[in-house]
Amino acid sequence: MLDEAVFEALLTRGYAIVHNYLTEPQRAEMAAALRRLLKPWEEVKDAPSPPHTAQHFFPYPEPCLNEAILNPIALQFARRWHDTHHIHYRQGLAMARYPGFTGNVGHPHIDN
């Protein structure tokens, strides 16, 4: 999927859209994993102290999310694009904001 056409699109346009890079079963598994990590508002709203935010950082407790980030084909493509084997993952997070959140959106570590 990350073939010469994708590479050429990056070179000429500066971006590339790769449709269906992950299979439908992979996407469904990842969506279910995110729902287990980040409970829907309907499941947390009646808690004695409902949360205003939920977050999980890499590495995730759900292996399918880590596997998507550390995909060997994507890493190989990134090495080619950047012309280096020194590819570093910038820590990301899975996050949900619930009603009542008033923190600074630019700083995910701050929760009011």
Image (cartoon, rainbow, N blue to C red):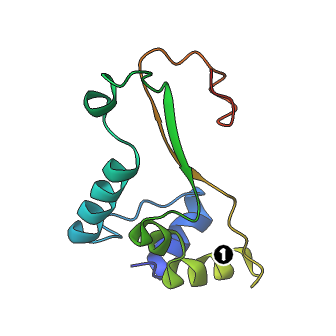
- Compared to residue 86, the image places residue 36 above or below, namely above
**Residue at coordinates 47% horizontally, 64% vertically from top-left?**
61
Tell me the quarter of the image containing the C terminus: top right
Crowd tier of the residue under label 1, counting other residues whose Cα lies within 10 Å: few below 14, some 14–19, many 20 or above = few
Asked whether 80 or 105 is in front, the reply is 105
**Residue at coordinates 63% horizontally, 75% vertically from top-left?**
78
**Residue at coordinates 78% horizontally, 80% vertically from top-left?**
86
Tell me the quarter of the image containing the N terminus: bottom left
- Compared to residue 86, the image places residue 38 above or below, namely above
Across and down, in percent, residue 68 comes to: 45, 70
Per the image, the residue denoted by label 1 is: 81
Amino acid carrying mark 1 in the image: Trp
Q: Secondary structure at mark 1?
A: helix
Across and down, in percent, residue 27 comes to: 29, 63
- Compared to residue 5, the image places residue 50 above or below, namely above
**Residue at coordinates 44% horizontally, 65% vertically from top-left?**
65
Residue 39 located left or right of residue 9: left
Residue farthest to the front?
48
Q: How many marks?
A: 1
Give the quarter of the image for residue 31. Answer: bottom left
Across and down, in percent, residue 76 comes to: 59, 84
Asked whether 82 or 99 is in front, the reply is 99
Give the quarter of the image for residue 63. Answer: bottom left
Residue 32 located left or right of residue 72: left
